[in-house]
Amino acid sequence: MLEIKHTLCPSCSVGCGINVVSHEGDVVGTYPYKRHPVNEGKNCLNGRNSIEAYKNKLESAIVSNSDVDIDKAIDEICSNLKSKDSDKITVFCSGNNSVEDIEAIKSFAEANNYNIASYADNIVDIDGEVASYDDVEKASKLIVIGDVLYTNPLIGRRIIHAKDNGADVYSFTPEGSVTANVSNEICDSIDDVLNNFGDNLDESSVILFNTVNSSEDLDKIKEIADKANSKILPVFSKCNSKGACEIIKAQSKEEFVELLNDTDLLLVFNDDLIPEIDFDFGSISTIVSFVPCENSTSNASQIVVPVKSWLENDGSFVNAMGETQTFSAVIESDALGVDEVIEKIQNKL
Amino acid sequence: MSYVLAKSKNPDIQEAGECGGAVTSIFKYLLDENIVDGVLALSPGDDIYDGVPTFITDSEDLIKTAGSYHCAPTMFGDIIQKYLSDKKVAVSVKPCDIRSIDELIKRHKINPDNIFTVGLNCGGTVSPVTGRKMIELFYDINPDDVVSEEIDKGQFIVELADGTEKGVKIHELEHEGYGRRLNCQRCDVKIPRKANIACGNWGASDGWTFIEINDEKGEELIKGAQKAGILETKSPSQDAIDARLKVEGIMIKMAKKNQDVNYEKVSGIKEWDRCIRCCACRDVCPICWCYENCELNKSYFNASDVPPSPIAFQGIRLSHMSFSCCDCGQCDDVCPMDIPVSLIFDKLQKKYQDRTGYVAGVSDDVKPPLYSPAKEEL
Ligand SMILES: Cc1cc2nc3c(=O)[nH]c(=O)nc-3n(C[C@H](O)[C@H](O)[C@H](O)COP(=O)(O)OP(=O)(O)OC[C@H]3O[C@@H](n4cnc5c(N)ncnc54)[C@H](O)[C@@H]3O)c2cc1C
Ligand code: SF4
Ligand code: SF4
Ligand code: SF4
Ligand code: SF4
């Protein structure tokens, strides 16, 4: 039977709605969700492609490159957990997990005295009020750091609306990029754009960024925003990074690498760390991945446990502007949720 | 061609239907008699501004699809082509839906023997988020309190639970950038005469649906539903028939005026320089059906070229399908960068029309032209 159901896009932190088409028990496509207030039916290519995660779903648990049943994999995880000192065990989660899953992961780590880590695009310490998308549209001036139109198009669209409303846009983005093409001025570095145009900001201005190189960059952004009474809006690459940061303090890249150096057993929940973090993951004796479909980190893991993909899950995300959005499963599934896997592990410890 | 006024004999459907509930009754007849496998229509999702395409296989479920969703700019052509081509389907179609279906039939992508098309006249659709904002701003009403909306006598009218109504002139709303979608403001096919029947409120007395029967299949639909005891009909007066044609003429005139004003703007479109090459405009277009084989996916197109040159990027699609563009506006709706994509496709189709007489999704027995002289002018 053909069905079209609402959910949220999991591919960045904007929080766009998306309709998913299922047909005879399979996910077959997407359809514009025009009633959604964030994106009005518009999704970028990443968003529309996000259903691929379901199409490439892992069918079975894996231990040392062989398919095994889930319980066998759980036993293996438990014996690994029992054999290691808890301070050498690190549990990692990120904005790819829902609020509910992150809470379950946090309780699990705390109950067993494991290290817990979360990482959000090298952006740390961002709790506190941020600009809303409406603030961006109504801004008098915008400083934009990163090619936001290209990377997070449905916030990029708000920059266009701001421009149409007469805002001045100053950006750090490559020349010729789409963001550069809607900017009044472009600069070669984060420092330049902040130094050259920070003084132009006022209380109806916003500094919007999807990338920082260091915590100093972030401090500077905050300092300039504070001085002008402007707002900031960090835009993350993962849908629930804001929600994750509210539950587990995000680490900087350096802090995280330091922790990995001291880790013997790494449990990764729904993420692909290898392309993102420059670290020799081969130096960790055991990596366990809990993922809906394979990725480079799961390929480097000794144990892989399939979990529900976002399409099979219910829960909530907090989008970049801090709004909690709930979503429901669009297709039935016999995969386990992260909370169910954790319960199984905890019961056997 | 003949005309009939119709209404449902089922009191629940009559109550829930927009006019006489004729459309829902015809669907019920088709399902109950197993003439179709299913009905493709809309049902409310989050609220009345959210029409969600729904495939109904049990006639008991039809009641939730009754009524007109003026804030649901949906498209059914591609849904049938992609997912339902092996099924016998009845579908409610606005002019842009049936025009795309007609173009897909001409491309052998939809089998005409497999579908029953129940047309809805269309004065235009409003985007749901715009619709809600507009109701807050111009009506001073909480959009959540609205139980139904309609477009009548040049007004967009909302009704509250206590029966009170408030209307604002559409041209006032549109002057302020609200109202119907921009493509709808240009759309000059108001009665879907390529559908088996075309239903509407124009020319209808209260509680009745005015139906223009367009072909033999349409005739059978009305007779079948009557025979099944679910549809009651009577003949409309000549005055009603004339009044309906007069309103249609006025709407077309208004659309042509909007075309003249807006087609001129095409050469000034600067927005291409923010195109992120996401291909949403192509993927949503009901006329484009090549998918993976699309020229735009070929390796000689540099996919990292962002923004792409509009001549090369949009030019491919313009030369492949603009002569068949039915001005459905889906490409505008989904463009993350708010680029008025449909304006250029629609303008080119009209140019083509002026030269050849070919009206996309309307002209009979003409294969879609493979060579468009108009495209040379791009
Ligand atoms: C957007 C819109 C604009 C219209 N404008 C005019 C007009 O200007 N003049 C005129 O004479 N008539 C117009 N109509 C048609 C009219 O409102 C009634 O739909 C028609 O008279 C049939 O009435 P009914 O009671 O028989 O239909 P019902 O029994 O209520 O059935 C209506 C069917 O149409 C489906 N439907 C509702 N909205 C849409 C949509 N957006 N797209 C596709 N299917 C849909 C429903 O799911 C249902 O199956 C419009 C309809 C729509 C949807
Ligand atoms: S902008 Fe982000 S949330 Fe929106 S569709 Fe694209 S990836 Fe998804
Ligand atoms: S394009 Fe035409 S038929 Fe389609 S919704 Fe707009 S006015 Fe109606
Ligand atoms: S080009 Fe745009 S308006 Fe024309 S048929 Fe395709 S989606 Fe519709
Ligand atoms: S939808 Fe818009 S941004 Fe995307 S390719 Fe089409 S015109 Fe470009």
Image (spheres, rainbow, N blue to C red):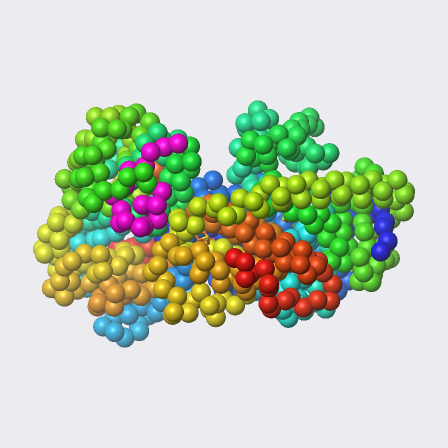
Q: Quadrant of residue B195?
A: bottom right
Magenta residue span: A166-182
B247 relative to A253, above or below: above
Residue at 35% over, 37% down: A321
Residue A288 on the magenta span: no
Horizontal and vertical percent position of residue B198: 76, 52
Residue at 27% over, 28% down: A201
Of residue B154 and residue B352, the one placed in the foreground of this image is B352
B367 relative to A48, above or below: below
Of residue B351 and residue A332, the one placed in the foreground of this image is B351
Q: Quadrant of residue B214?
A: bottom right
Taking the image as drawn, is residue B42 in sight? yes
Task: Determine whether, in the image, residue B162 is placed left or right of residue B374.
Answer: right
Horizontal and vertical percent position of residue B40: 65, 56
Circle count = 0
Q: As drawn, which residue projects farthest toward the bottom?
A: A66
Residue A168 on the magenta span: yes
Of residue B177 and residue B370, the one placed in the foreground of this image is B370
Residue at 25% over, 70% down: A63
Taking the image as drawn, is residue B15 in sight? no
Of residue A94 and residue A221, the one placed in the foreground of this image is A221
Q: Quadrant of residue A285?
A: bottom left
Task: Determine whether, in the image, residue B111 is placed left or right of residue A329.
Answer: right
Horizontal and vertical percent position of residue B337: 43, 47
